[in-house]
Each structure stands twice: as C-alpha cells, then as structure tokens.
Image (cartoon, rainbow, N blue to C red):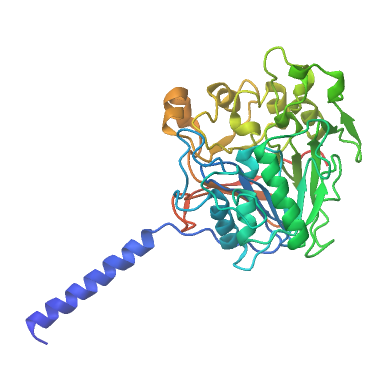
Amino acid sequence: MSGRARRLALGVALLAAFVLALAADEPAALAPWTRGTLDIHQISTGRGNAAFFRFPDGTTLLVDAGDVGEGVPGATAFPDAGRGAGEWVARYVKRAAGEDAALDYALVTHFHPDHLGAPLSAARSSAAGYKIAGLAEVAEHVAIRRLIDRGFPDYGEPAAPSGPVIENYRKFADFAAKERGMARERIRPGRADQIVPIHEPGAFPDFEVRAVAANGEVWTGKGDEVERRVPPSADLPEPDRAPENVCSIALRVRYGRFRYFTGGDLYGQPEPGAPAWWDVETPIAKAIGAVDVMVVNHHGSIEPANPFFLATLRPRVVVVPAWSPTHPSPDVLKRLLSKRIWPAPRDVFVTRLREPTKLTIGPRARQVASDAGHVVVRVEPGGASYRVFVVDDTNESGAVKSVHGPYAVAGGTP
C-alpha cells in the first residue's frame, strides 16, 4: 500500500472513530413502556396542558389537550409552531404507544382552552362545523374510544359553561360520538370503577384511578362517599358562583403503595372576598393524605398549593405543568420549595419555565430539578419505586435530558 493510500485509510478510520464517539455522546431516547409498568407523561407543548398515561396493562388515558394558539403573549410553541398543539400531542402518544395506538380514555378536567383547545381562527374547520384544535385535533390522528368530562349530557349545574370554547367542544364531541362511535360519560366523583384497566381486567388489582373531586363534590376518603361543597347557583350572588376552575376534575392514581395526584385548575387559596368553599384543595388533602408525585393545580398560578394541602400531601416529586410566562407564580414556587411547610426533600420539575418568569422569581428559579421538557414518571412493576425522566421538548427525538431517582415509594391512604 502506498503512503497516500495508508494516509487515506488512516483518515477514514479516524473519521469513523469520531463519528462513533459522537454517536456515543448522543442522549439516549426514553426506553419503551413494558407490561407491568405505569408511565405518566406530562407533555410540554408550550400552549396548554396535556398528560398521557399508560396503565400497567397497556390501557391508555389522555388528560386534557389544550391549545391557546397565539392568544397568550410569550407562550411560544414546542417543538415549533409548524403544527397545532393537538397534533404534537397525538404524535407524542404514537411515539409512546405505537403508530396504531388509540386512546381508551380521554378526560377533560374543565372547559378552558388551555385544557381542551380554543376554536382558533387559524385552525381548519371540520365538515361538522367545529374548529380542529386541541382535543379535536388529537382525535384527527388518534382514535378516542371514550370521552369523560364534568358536564355531559346537560352541561348545567354547578357552573354552566358558555361561549365559543364550550360550543366548539360540544360540536366536536357530538360529531365524534355519532360518526366515530366514541362513548361519552360524565365523571362520577368518589368512584374508582369508571376509569379502569380494560386490556387485562383484574391482572393488576393494586392499580386504581379514583375521581376525588369534580363539580364541587369531593371524595371523603370513605368508600365512594362524597361531600358536596358548592351551593346551587340560584342561591348565590353572581360574583360568588362557582368558577369553572373550582369545578375541575381531580384524580388520584394508586399502584401498589405509589400515589399520584392531578387536579386541573383547582383552587387552594380563593381570591380575597371569595367564599371559603372555593378552596377545594383542603378537603381533598383530608381525603387522600400523602402522595409520592403531585401535579400542581392551575399551573402553579396564584390560587393553588395552600400550605395545608402541601403539608398533607408532602410529595417527593412535584410537577408544575407551566406553559405561560405567568407560571408558576413566585409565591407558589416559594411554598413548593419551603422546608417550613414540610421538611422532607422534594424535587420540583417545571415543563417550561420561561425566561421572564425566571427573572421575576429570581434565584429561587435555580432550585428546581428541571426547568424545561416533558416530565415522565415511570413506576416500576408493583409500584415499589419510580424514576423521573426529563425528555427534550424542542424536537421529537425522545432524547432523555436527565434521569432522577430511583425514588422509594412512601405509601399513603389506601
């Protein structure tokens, strides 16, 4: 071999070694779900709330699929604005559960655009006359078998939603039920037999999804018993009637000794002068006790996470589903990090902590475990331990940015 040929061969070998080294440094993608594992994905689109669950038997649940579009200053889209948030959520579900995945359940916690989608002017209109955005856009790409919300079928008491958002949602739901065979139900607070594993019924008896609150009814912690906290609207002056957020659906998920809580936009600290019963967090805390993972209500805005609620739930992992520059508020983040409220260690994961928010919060913003990305809680078979994976939300690679845990499960109220 000539000297030139040897130099060329050496160059090729060095280049190959360099490429392999680069490949080795690339972040690994999140490993696929396996039977017996519980996966909970808090999806970051920058335009609203969405969470995808894969139960131990493979049953799928989507909680919310919001899209505020360009309606909130500073709420840029992720991975980008080339698709609607609903389509990004659908693509995420397919990566997590397979191209042929269907949603066994979709649940809308309450009727606000950042949880179900706004009838965006830029969105396509369906043949049935509704705008394809948010949950309606998810349904264009992933079949929804059963839809659960707080108002079906009459959408009346305790708060009757009105306006273009609920009108668009109801047109979509009516069409999907009639033309696509989607079942519809109203949530049943206190019950643990409405959202259940359907692929292997009975295979995981220590797994449960319980509706702990909705429409002002809160589970008492005893059987299926609930306490009604919201008076009839006719008995109240207009300013004191239940706002939409207070009617949000809240869920507790149990797997073995593992406990998880999520509650839409519930309040824990009513605005000044509002009725005390606007605080739904306190009775929920009394019913469910300690949890391992808690999703902060109302994106960590100004009304949630009261001290009693935090001291009772005392989560090891806190997820803040933030997407706007107003999330989370400085006071809520201060309470989430405060060792005076509960002394045990905790890790706080924020789906998207915007730069203006960091400037407003100050040094405390650097105390979170992660400030950007999808947050995936993966509970090991049987529910004895779990890990948290932060996944890149700026592209669809599924690259894991950081891994936290394993966390030992503390256990809580049965």
Percent x, y for residue 309?
72, 26
Question: Height in image: 56 above or below 247?
Answer: below
Q: Quadrant of the N terminus?
A: bottom left
- Tell whether 112 sits left or right of 278: left
Count of marks, rendered view: 0
| Residue with the most extreme bottom position | 1
Is any atom of residue 283 visible in this view? Answer: yes
Seen from the viewer's position, the closer of residues 179 and 147 is 179
**Based on the displayed image, in which of its 4 quarters is residue 273 positioned?**
top right
**Based on the displayed image, in which of its 4 quarters is residue 343 positioned?**
top right
| Residue with the most extreme left position | 3
- Tell whether 100 sits left or right of 214: left
Q: Quadrant of the C terminus?
A: top right
Percent x, y for residue 16?
27, 71
Percent x, y for residue 349?
55, 39
**Based on the displayed image, in which of its 4 quarters is residue 296 positioned?**
top right
Is any atom of residue 382 visible in this view? Answer: no
Seen from the viewer's position, the closer of residues 299 and 132 is 132
- Please name the residue shown 71% across and 39% down the image: 261
Percent x, y for residue 324?
51, 34
Seen from the viewer's position, the closer of residues 206 and 29 is 29
- Please name the residue shown 73% across and 51% down the image: 173
